[in-house]
Amino acid sequence: MTLTRSITRIALATAFLLLIPLVAMQFTKEVTWTLDDFIIAGILLFGSGLAYTLVARMGGSTTYRVAVGVAVVAGLLLVWGNLAVGFIGSENNPANLLYGGVLAVGIIGAIAARFRPLGMARAMFAAALTQFLVPFVAMAIWKPEADLGLVQVLALNTVFAGLWAGSGWLFRRAGTTVPGVNQ
């Protein structure tokens, strides 16, 4: 499939997904999106689809493409969740900005690895470790009171760290099963 056709499909899928809250707003007061919400959601959805399309084309196996998909979904959910409600406290808590470091580690690591499977695996494992460490760094800086919210934050970070690690494991498998791209 050509890149132009892929981009067209991504744009159509993004538009379709944005129709869901638009239609829901017509029938319920529970869904209240602003124009900014639609713009940000559109950028996130289209950008994630485009990132998947561009990076997945670099791999030679289904395992590589699945690994890219897991990483892109983890990144999308990380950003979306932080913008919507925040992982640490509310979406306005400055500690949530630390999650940008998780994305930076993954993206910079992927670029440094030139998107080769084993390098991508290392980048995703580093992102998993960074994800897991964010709440501890936040606690060291902001000294929150211990409560049930802390347990939930740690559990949520463990789930996301698992997504990054799962992507890393898939990249490692892709690197060991595709001859000539094990770097």
Image (cartoon, rainbow, N blue to C red):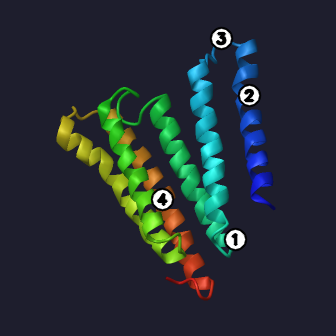
- Whole-Å distance between the Cαs marked 4 and 3? 36 Å
Q: Which residue is mark 3?
A: 29
Q: Earlier in the sequence, mark 1 or mark 3?
A: 3
Q: Earlier in the sequence, mark 4 or mark 3?
A: 3
- Whole-Å distance between the Cαs marked 1 and 3? 42 Å
Q: Which residue is mark 4?
A: 164
Residue 172 percent across, percent down from the top left? 52, 76
| Residue 154 visible in the picture | no
Amino acid type shown at disc 4: Trp
Amino acid type shown at disc 1: Thr
Q: Residue at x 42, y 68 (%)?
A: 112
> Where is 111 relative to 156, above or below?
below
Mark number displayed over residue 37 = none
Amino acid type shown at disc 3: Lys
> Where is 2 relative to 12, above or below?
below
Q: Which residue is mark 2?
A: 20
Label 4: element kind? helix
Q: Which residue is mark 1?
A: 62
* Disc 2 and disc 3 in contact, CB within 8 angstroms: no
Residue 118 or 53: which is nearer the viewer? Answer: 53
Amino acid type shown at disc 2: Ile
Extreme residue toward the front, this view: 4
